[in-house]
Amino acid sequence: MPAPTRIHELLEARALQSPGTAFLFEPSGTVSYGALQAMAETAAQDLLDAGVRPTDRVLLVAENCAAHIALIMACSRIGAWSCGVNARMSPGEVAAIAGRADARLCCFTTDASDAARQHAQRAGAVPSALPGVMRSAVRAEASPEADPELADTAAIIFTSGTSGTPKGVMVSHRGLLHFGRVSASVRSLGAHDRVYAFLPMTHIFGIGTVLMAALTGGAALVLRASFSPADMLHALAHEEVSNLLGPPTMYARLLAHVEAERCMPRFPALRYVYTGSAPLDLGLKQRVETLFGQPLHYGYGLSEYAGSVFLTRVEAPRADTAAGHVVEGGEARIVGADGKDLAQGETGEIWLRGPGLMLGYFRDAAVTAQVMRPGGWYASGDLGRFGADGALFVVGRLKEMIIRSGFNVYPAEIEAVIGRFGGVHLCAVVGVPETDGNERIVAFVEMKPGALLDEPALRAYLAEHLSPYKRPARIETIDAMPTTANGKVLKRALQARAARSIG
C-alpha cells in the first residue's frame, strides 16, 4: 500500500485493515475504525452537497468527539481546509475567526458540546447529514486559493493568542503525516496502547501529538471533550490508559486534585507520561515523577511546525528540564539579535526548519515575512539555549523577556525559583513598562489547596536565589491562572491585570 499523502488516508487504511477494531472510547460508547470511516464519508458528502469545494475553509466549532474527527477527515477527503475553533470561545471570537478564515461553512458538534449547541442556535444552523452535527452557511461564495504552493494545506490552526491577535497557521498534510510518524515512533505506539485524549483537536497538540500519532501507530483514544482530574484518574485506573499527555498546567491541576482529595491513584497500564506547549518547571517535573513513579518526558513544539521539533528519548530520560534533541528531519539554530549563530550555552532565539514547517499565515503575507528568514528558516520568537549534549533548554518567549536595569530577565528563571517555594502551586511572571524605559517585574502565584502565601518568607527566599534586578517588585496571589483551552497560561491577561493594579 502506498504511503499516505493526505491525513484522511490514515483512517481509510485502518478502516480497510481492521474495520471492527475500536478506535475511540467515549463516555457514550466505543467507535470502531470502520464506523468512524463511515461517518467521515457521510460528512464529506454533506459538505459537497452544501457547496464546499477544494481550498474552501470549513469552520469546525467543536469539542472533542467522534463527529469532530470525522469532520476533520471529511475536509481532507474533499480537499477543503478545516479550521478548528474551540466551542468554549465567545461568540465574538468565533465570528472573528470565521471572518479571518473567509469560511464557506460552519459546522457545530452540538451533541457533544452545550457550547457548540449555543453557537449553532445563534447562527441559525440546520441539522447536517452527520448525526450530532449542525451546519450553517457563512457565505454563498468564499474566495478560493489558487496558489499551487498552498495545495498541500490540511488545516488552518489559529494560534491561541497569548500575546496578540490569533494568526491562521496553514498546516500541511506533509507536516502532520511526518509528525504522526515521528511521535508514534518515539512512543512506540501500537495496538496495545490507549491514549487519554482531552487535548482539543482544534490545536496542534491535539490533532498532531494525539490524533495523527494514534492513527499512525494504531493506538486507541480514550476521548474526552475537556479536562477533569477525577475523570482522568478514573480512566487511568479502569480504562487501560497507557499514554498520558498534556501541558504543565494539566499536571499541576492533577496534583492539586490528588492532594486535596487525598486519593491514591492507580495506573496499571501507564507507560508513557509527556508534557509540552510551555516551559517546564523542575519542581513540577519531580512531583509528577514521584506521583507516577516514572519519567515525565518533555518536548518543544508549536503550531507553526505541525508538532514537536524536540523530544526527550524514552530510552534516555532526563533529570533536568531540557526538551530533548531535534527529531527526524528537523533542524534548529540558536540565533542572536544580529542573526548570527550563538555559542553553545548562550541564550537566543530558536530558529527552525524542516518538513513540518507551516506553509505560512493564511492571507497574511506581511506577518509571514516577519518570521521567515533566508534559507527557509522560521524565527520562532522563543528563547532557548543548547546544552553541552545538544539538548534544547527552552527559556521563554522573546516578547515576554523583561528589560530591568539594562539586563535581560527571563520570566521562566524567576518562575522556576518561586515554584520551588513551599506551598506554591503555579507561578507566572510578567513585565509592566515604566516611564523610564524599565519594566517592573510582577509575579502571580497560585497556591496549593489550603496553603497561604507568606510573602516576607518568599522574598527572603528570593533574595537567596535571585540577583536584585530579577526579584519581583510585586507579588500577587491568584485563585487560578487564566489559561487557554490548550492549557497555556495567558500571560497577556496577567500583564493587563498587573498594569491595572499598578496604575
Image: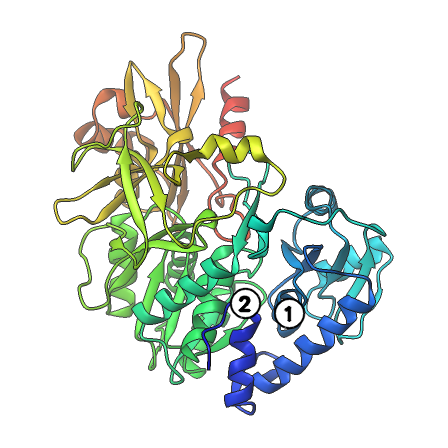
Q: Is residue 355 above or below residue 34?
A: above
Q: Position of residue 461 (x, y in %)?
A: 22, 33
Do callouts 2 and 1 mark residues in contact (Cβ within 8 Å)?
Answer: yes
Q: Position of residue 238 (x, y in %)?
A: 44, 83
Name the residue at the top extreme: 436
Q: Give me the disc on residue 77.
A: 1
Q: Is residue 23 above or below residue 187?
A: below
Q: Position of residue 83 (x, y in %)?
A: 64, 54
Q: Residue at x 26, y 28 (%)?
A: 340
**In the picture, residue 126 is in which quadrant?**
bottom right
Q: Is residue 35 left or right of residue 118?
A: left
The answer to whether residue 157 is visible is no
Q: Is residue 162 left or right of residue 373?
A: right
Mark 1 burial class by Cα count in 10 Å: few <14, some 14-19, many 20+: many
Helix or strand or loop: what does disc 1 sit on? helix
Q: Nearer the viewer, residue 60 or 481?
A: 60
Mark 2 burial class by Cα count in 10 Å: few <14, some 14-19, many 20+: some
Estimate the spatial distance between the alpha carbons at disc 2 and disc 1, rounded to whole Å.
8 Å
Helix or strand or loop: what does disc 2 sit on? loop
Residue annotated with mark 2: 6
Q: Position of residue 199 (x, y in %)?
A: 50, 61
Q: Residue at x 34, y 73 (%)?
A: 264
Q: Is residue 144 left or right of residue 189?
A: right
Q: Is residue 332 above or below residue 299?
A: above
Q: Nearer the viewer, residue 324 or 403?
A: 324
Q: Residue at x 64, y 72 (%)?
A: 70
| Sooner in the amino-acid sequence: mark 2 or mark 1 | 2
Q: Give me the disc on residue 200.
A: none
Q: Is residue 201 above or below residue 387?
A: below
